[in-house]
Image: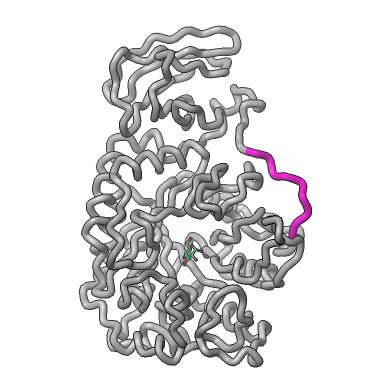
Amino acid sequence: MLTNLLIASLLSMAAPSSSPEIVEGIQGYVPTPEVLESRQRFSDDKFGIFIHWGVYSMLGRGEWVMNTDKIRFSDYSILPGGFYPGNFDAAEWVSAFKAAGARYITITTRHHDGFSMFKSRWSDYNIVDATPFGRDIIKELADECHKQGITINFYYSLLDWCREDYPIGNSGHHSGRDESKANYASYLDFMCNQITELLTNYGPVGCIWFDGDWDHIKKKADGSYPDIDFDWGYGRIYELIHSLQPGCLVGNNHHRRTIPGEDIQLFERDVPGENTAGYSRTDVVSTALPLETCQTINKSWGFDINDHTYKTDQELIRLLVRTAGRNANLLLNVGPQPDGRIPALSLERLAQIGEWLSVNGETIYGTRSTLLKPQPWGVVTEKDNKIFLHVLEKPESGSIVLPLSLKVKSVRSFADGTELNFKRTKSELTVVLPESYDCSTDYIVEITAK
Ligand code: GLC
């Protein structure tokens, strides 16, 4: 394996800092062989589609509308009565995502508004019992994913703006709940019961993806995180998941260091190691676990009728490349419309990504990126005896110097196989780029090691 040939000191991601933090989760967690296998498969997959869909899509102002518009639960709960996404077609969705090159789908089974998009015996506030549509879209989607051979993952909100047993945190203050009824033990039982349904009734699930932990984090005045905050009972939740489906991974979008029992480290709106959006800490990038970064295709997660600020095809492809070049997967979001359709512009963008991946997928899928940290000119991915240089900006010198001691068989332009000049010393490999080339999306150099 190429990785073994190369020097460990080139490892680039920031090492976890040693500051004290919450220690909870499954004490002494030892991942099973099934989990280890799932982690590898997950890292190989590289590209997934995130779906934020719920009754909030009817209002067309994103998934936080209940909170931002200060809607009381007694008013918000009118929405399911009119929810009839008649154009929903799981087969169409899954085909479009597969054509985009996605290898997995992560869908919101229940978001912060507390509405379950699946049939649940633990709450009538669900798509089968509370809407005229009456269909379990999670079931239809999971079945279709299994049929078309693509992994299904479930997003599950830890926080809830409707249930009175959920202890109110940083959000959902206007829902009109009676705070005196808060009872976390009861709420935790409810979540465990629903997670049991999700992992029992829908076939194999790739990952349970938690969100909302931050509802009970009070950042310190200096912006740092407290050592101990709310006790979510993660040990119990994670044990349950691993016992129900031994190959199912656990991820938690808590923006902090991973805790025992978690299998993936998640990042929101930034590639690992960057923090332009303010949700990520750059000092806690794991080198031991698979990484995933989620990002929106425009600016919104849930359907926003006014949001036309779509990222361009080029921006999205470069994002995928920059993510792979940080050893991470990209989970790219779409927010379906209330009629059950994926917005047309999202479909157009996905088709373009799919076209690019159908040609260049070899340089992304199944790769890792551990040899060289991101460079001003771009990133590196590697697989077996190949190293791919993804040139995203032209280096002024016209060449790229890699601090790699490597016996080289060939250096080629990936697009057309043209041989490129290179020089090798004991400790460096210099690749001479062609006089003219287009890296406005990604110019890929393929290095094959002997
Ligand atoms: C944030 C948002 C949430 C969204 C999530 C996706 O946590 O609060 O609405 O589901 O990001 O990563």
Decide: is 373 above or below 411: below
Q: Residue 258: x and y, percent?
A: 65, 55
Q: Can residue 250 be seen in this view?
A: no
Q: Residue 224: x and y, percent?
A: 70, 55
Quadrant, the N terminus: top right
Foreground: 208 or 221? 221
Location of residue 213 (image quadrant): bottom right
Decide: is 293 above or below 191: above
Going 60% across and 12% down the picture, which residue do you hit?
427
User: What's the magenta bit mostly, secondary-structure-wise?
Assistant: loop
Question: Which portion, as a residue range, is magenta?
Answer: 14-22
Going 34% across and 42% down the picture, which residue do you hit?
315
Going 62% across and 31% down the picture, which residue do you hit?
11
Q: Is residue 194 visible?
A: yes
Decide: is 185 above or below 33: below
Q: Residue 355: x and y, percent?
A: 25, 42
Foreground: 355 or 223? 223
Foreground: 379 or 30? 379
